Image (spheres, rainbow, N blue to C red):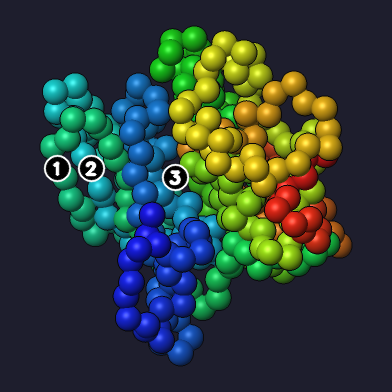
Amino acid sequence: MFSSLNQPQNPNLIVGFEHNEDCGIYQISSSNFLLQSVDFITPVVDDPYIYGKIAAANALSDIFTMGSEVQTALNILMWDREHVSKEALGEILKGGMEKIIESNAVLLGGHTIIDREQKYGLSVSGIAQKFWKNNTAKIGDVLILCKPIGSGIITTALKKEKLLLSQAQICIDSMQLLNLYAMRVAKNYPISACTDITGFGLIGHIYEMCREDLGVNLFVDSVAIFPQVMELISQGCVSGGSKNNKAYYEKYVKKEKEMQEDIFLYDAQTSGGIVFALSKEKANFLLDELKKTKYEYASIIGEFVPRRGDCAIVLG
């Protein structure tokens, strides 16, 4: 998207928009870095309060994924006033505020416009002395995924009225769960690379962790999936974004496992889990801590290996 944009080099620009990192990073002193990101989403559930919490958790995650706490946030609100009442709007903002407070961050303000489609999210900032990047893993490192996948399929089913909100509670709880707590646990371990699973799906974001010399063996059976996902796929509850993900990324994927369906691996997630890369020797210790810290579905889902040409990810 930004490939045609050129700007003068700046020695303080540490991470820009060139390498699909979760945040931009700007050095503000010899030991401090400013992390910034912005994200907003359309409603994934009908309940405005829950939607606000999920949208905020989704936006805040970008800072956590880089290994930092959030210091400040700004509301970004596009109000569909023909379909969303002022009372519902207040509930959206209330849900977002709850997650900002839970993060120990400060809301500085924000901006609202009238739009034909409801959207809400945050611009977020953090200050860090050290940070994680997404493409610095080493051969032999393993990947730990903190949350199940399939939220895009679940929310599509909710929109199609093929699933009740009460039947999707595990997924709703997961999307509301901040990745803050996973980051705090992982800060005690030698994390070599990190990202979170959002709009490009599991395959897309793991592909961003790969390099010309580095690929991933993905342990498909170890990937946690929300209940009912496979049944809902058979009912056609797959978003256009997930189909686009597969169309784009499957050329980098090789199957060494028989699979009747693989679209869940490309499913566009909202407020998905963090993926940590670290050595095998430390991975089980981190996994045990994560399972005791709100992330009961955390699992080791793959290993970094030498890349096989165009094939970045092997499904095994």
Q: Is residue 226 toward the left or the right of residue 278 in the image?
A: left
Residue plotted at (65% across, 43% down)? 251
Q: Which residue is mark 1?
A: 113
In the structure shown, which secondary structural element does the residue marked by tag 2 occupy?
strand
- At label 1, the amino acid type is Ile
Q: Pinpoint residue 284: horizontal percent, then vertical percent.
A: 82, 53
For the residue marked with disc 2, what is the amino acid? Leu
Q: Secondary structure at mark 1?
A: strand
**Picture coordinates of residue 116, whole percent (x, y):** 18, 30
| Mark 2 touches mark 1? (CB < 8 Å) | yes
Compare residues 293 and 116 and report the one nearer the observer: 116
2 or 1: tag closer to the N-terminus: 2
* Residue 139 disc label: none
Residue at 63%, 58% (x, y): give it. 209
- Say what amino acid the circle numbered 3 marks: Asn
Mark 3 lies on residue:
58
The image position of residue 22, as x and y in percent, is 48, 58
Q: Choose the circle earlier in sequence order: 2 or 3.
A: 3
**Cα gap from disc 2 to disc 3, whole angstroms:** 15 Å
Q: What's the CA distance linking mark 1 and mark 3? A: 21 Å
Q: Tell me the crowding category of disc 1: few under 14, some 14 to 19, or many 20 or more residues within 10 angstroms, Cα based.
A: few
Left or right of residue 178: residue 306: right
Residue in the picture at 59% in, 62% down: 134
Q: Tell which of 239 and 145 is nearer to you.
A: 239
Outermost residue, bottom direction? 30
Q: Height in image: 27 above or below 65?
A: below
Q: Quadrant of the N terminus?
A: bottom left
The residue that label 2 is drawn on is 77
Viewport quadrant of the C terminus: top right
Assign a secondary structure to mark 3. Answer: helix
Between residue 169 and residue 83, name the one nearer to us: 83
